[in-house]
Image (spheres, rainbow, N blue to C red):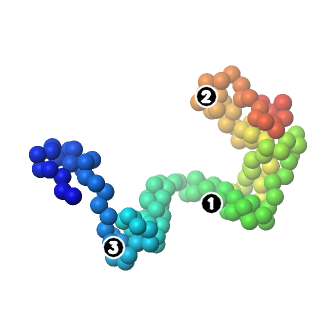
Amino acid sequence: MAVDSTVPRRLRKSLRIHQTSAICEGCKATPENPGARYCNTCALERKRARWRHRHRKLSPEARKRANARSYLHSYIRRGLIVKLPCQECGGLDVEAHHPDYSKPLEVIWLCRGKHLALSGQVERVKVLYRIKAVQPQHGDCESAV
């Protein structure tokens, strides 16, 4: 269905009905999902490429931290590493602290408040959220911050 040429150009695109193609724009195969512009393989590759483009600006140190966290979380998901209670207070709502990012599976399990205090982020959080003190989260010890 064509859009009337009397409609201003800036409005034509919004009035256009989504036109679907019978072939994938990437590999020219037939998409598995009706109405899709890309087959599943090409759609996943586009998503990966967009993610890589957005995350390529990480510094080497930030990349090392991100890789360590990702590596640890994949082990947690698989059940190869189990979260332990906070080493300071015994709380169950814990976060992993990496003392050394070159050893991604060696972590210290800490409550949110203790983790912020250890990493020196307490003042930053106070400024960002305009609060007088970081409130303990559920499961944190009362003397966290």
Q: Earlier in the sequence, mark 1 or mark 2?
A: 1
Q: CA distance from mark 1 to mark 2?
A: 28 Å
Secondary structure at numbered mark 3: loop
Q: Name the residue beneath numbered marker 2.
A: 129
Q: CA distance from mark 2 to mark 3?
A: 50 Å
| Amino acid identity at mark 2 | Tyr
CB contact under 8 Å: marks 2 and 3: no
Secondary structure at numbered mark 2: helix
Q: Earlier in the sequence, mark 2 or mark 3?
A: 3
Q: Name the residue beneath numbered marker 3.
A: 23
Res. 68 image quadrant: bottom right
Q: Is residue 42 visible?
A: no
Res. 100 image quadrant: bottom right
Which x, y percent locates residue 63?
A: 57, 57
Q: Is residue 39 above or below residue 47?
A: below
Looking at the rendered image, the disc whose residue lies closer to the viewer, 3 or 1, is: 3
Which x, y percent locates residue 18?
A: 31, 57
Q: Name the residue beneath numbered marker 1.
A: 67
Res. 125 image quadrant: top right
Q: Is residue 122 visible?
A: yes
Q: Please, which residue is most extreme toward the left here? A: 6
Neighbor class of circle 2 (other Cα within 10 Å; few <14, some 14-19, many 20+) is few
Q: Please, which residue is most extreme toward the top here? A: 132
| Amino acid identity at mark 1 | Asn
Instruction: Name the side, left or right, on which 51 lies relative to 18.
Output: right
Q: Nearer the viewer, residue 32 or 106?
A: 32
| Amino acid identity at mark 3 | Ile
Q: CA distance from mark 3 to mark 1?
A: 37 Å
Secondary structure at numbered mark 1: helix
